[in-house]
Amino acid sequence: MDKDGFSFKRVLVAAIVGLIGCIAIWVAVPYNNFYLDNTYLSDSFLPEGVIALLLILVLAVNPLLKLLGKRFTLDRRQMALICSMLLLAAIIPSNGLMRMFPRFVAQMTVDFNTGVTTSQVAADAGFRQSLFPDPLPTRNEDGSVKTYDTPVSDQFIDELEEGETIPWRAWIKPFASWGVLIMALWAMMMGLSSIVYPQWKENERLPFPLLNVYQAITGDPDATEKRLLPEIFYSKSFWIATTIVFIIHAFRGLNVFTNAFPSFPLKWELGQYYTDSILRYSTASFKWQIIFFSVVGVTYFMPNRYSVSIWVWVFVYSWYITLGRAYIPAYHEGQCDQQSFGVLLSIAIWTLWLGRAHWAKVGRAMFGKAGNDAEARRNSIAGWIFVLGFTGIIFWLYWAGCPLWWSVVAGVGCAIISLIMARIIAETGIPALWTGRITIQHITSFFPLQWTSPAVLLMTGALYALVTRATAVSAAVLSTLAIGADKKASPRHQGRLAVGGLLLLLIGFMVCGAVHVKMGYSSAEVSTNPKTGGGHIDKWARADDAKYEFFTQERGHQAVGMGMGMGLLWACSRFPAWPIHPIGILFCRYSLGHLLWFSVFLGWLIKAGITNLFGGGAYRRARPFFLGLIMGELLAVIVWALVPVAIVLVTGVDAADVPRYMLMRYP
């Protein structure tokens, strides 16, 4: 028994069960998402695959284990550890990494050897050959460009030719080389999460709405009555909400598969009625909507300041864009993106400022100047993991051929993006979110093109895939949730989880990487997407003619966004009742903002009605009902993801011919 009252035997059992679940995610999710082109099961901050495995353990495995004796069942702490492991496993197989990698590595290799300008730049750039599975272009003695065939990459993108075997050996060096950068990114994010979680949870009291779901499934440590199942599963209102939502989606799914059942109208389109009014210029926010019960449920646990800010900002900006399209000839609606960039920078700066004392405390702990208690050791571990990852990013980029100054800038940018995503989800709990409003490319644009290099242009594209697009399943967010899954976890346990989490991610990188390589060579129908390519370096051919201006119209909008963000953040900190937070600007003129704002509005409206009419006690009593809304929709997604798989396995039909019922599809 350790100092936390958690025996080594129980930790080992939980770790083994968790690892089995992780392997299931790493193997099943790629084939489900990309081979069968089915509903994505590991691509949000409420990963359906994780929820499914947890429910199996709680509702099926534990009751069976009880038949052998209560001491054989998985207790709350074991379930929390398993939950943490599964959350970390969900980072890897799809939009968190492998949807883009290794596909973009193969795509870059092909682009280097097929594009006219691209091959010329690549031949002179001196890229590291170990990063790519096929030869890179070179110069002949007469100065002409020599390109090469790329069979390893071509067959991965398309399909293995008949009689060929998977070239595993050709991928060893690329996986090892890129793997160092990926592990450095994960270490930076894991260390960052371990640093900020205590500050945000204990000092700033951020709500972490999604933790309500995970802690409800694994069990409430404050529950006084000892039962086999967590308390939430004994709530009638929870099961009522779960059943209602599941039935609604059941009928909608049956309608898609059979066209013989009625479909509940959760979606409406009004654009056809706007042809003769100013609203014909409106954004998608006004033209169509769909209700997501999981978002309605999460909004119930979101403080009003954030929920109001989301739907108010989307509504206001939609009118702003509508009027601009209608009455301003030179109106450029992309200014919203630049203003969002400034707002996100202000959030990062404000977050760092609020936590300055905690960061100093972590710094002292790293050098043994904060005592030797469990909290100091946790802070020291978190700090050194962050530093190891941050410096690893910098030196890897420098090794890859980037200037040292840019490598530092890029490392800082990666940390800022990770911090922003972790902060946004800690405050709002929006389960599906990614941001392209702030990228390494945006930050690089502050400097003249001539200061950069082909390697910089290449790595801005790579980091777009590895950091920006990966914010859809951000390692910074999921590691924060993994640390918070155990409500009563001690600092000692949190420190161990950070170290163990990195080891788990390394195992997952190798296992899931092998699955994706095999899957890529097995079929041309695999629907992964590189999100970047070798064409990024073409810009270097025009570097001599590129004009540089710092004070542009874009900079003006960025400054406006930053000033507006800082002002609103100051008001939020100065006046407790201040209702508007700048975080809502992120959702404006944005596909997810168009999709989610009405569900956020609906959740806020219901919550406001309950609290204003019936008081705080009614709010607490209604919590299981809104957890049921979330669970019902997640269960529906899981079931309707399994139905096409079952049809393919039983009937043997082509997966492309099987209907799909999907709530949301990731672009």
Image (cartoon, rainbow, N blue to C red):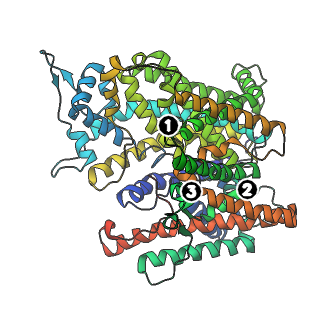
Q: Earlier in the sequence, mark 1 or mark 3?
A: 3
- Please determine whether, in this image, residue 562 is positioned above or below residue 391: below
Residue 68 visible in the displayed image: no
The first of marks 2 and 3 along the sequence is 3
**Residue 624 in the image, given as x and y percentages of width and height:** 74, 66
Specify which label sits upstream in the sequence, 1 or 2: 2
Up-down relation of residue 437 to residue 129 (above or below): below
Q: Residue at x 55, y 46 (%)?
A: 324
Query: Where is residue 321 drawn, in percent x and y?
Result: 56, 48
Occupied quadrant, residue 634: bottom right
| Callout 1–callout 3 Cβ contact below 8 Å | no
Q: Amino acid at mark 2?
A: Phe
For the view shown, which residue lies furthest in the left direction? Answer: 142
| Labels 2, 3: front one | 3
Mark 3 secondary-structure assignment: helix
Callout 2 secondary element: loop
**Residue picked out by circle 1:** 467
> Which residue occupies the foreground of this view, 308 or 253?
308
Name the amino acid type tagged 3: Ser
Disc 1 on helix, strand or loop? helix
Q: Which mark is residue 285?
A: 3
In whole angstroms, how far apart are the C-alphas of marks 2 and 3? 24 Å
Seen from the viewer's position, the closer of residues 592 and 414 is 592
Q: Which mark is residue 301?
A: 2
Q: Residue furthest bottom?
A: 260
Q: Quadrant of residue 229?
A: bottom right
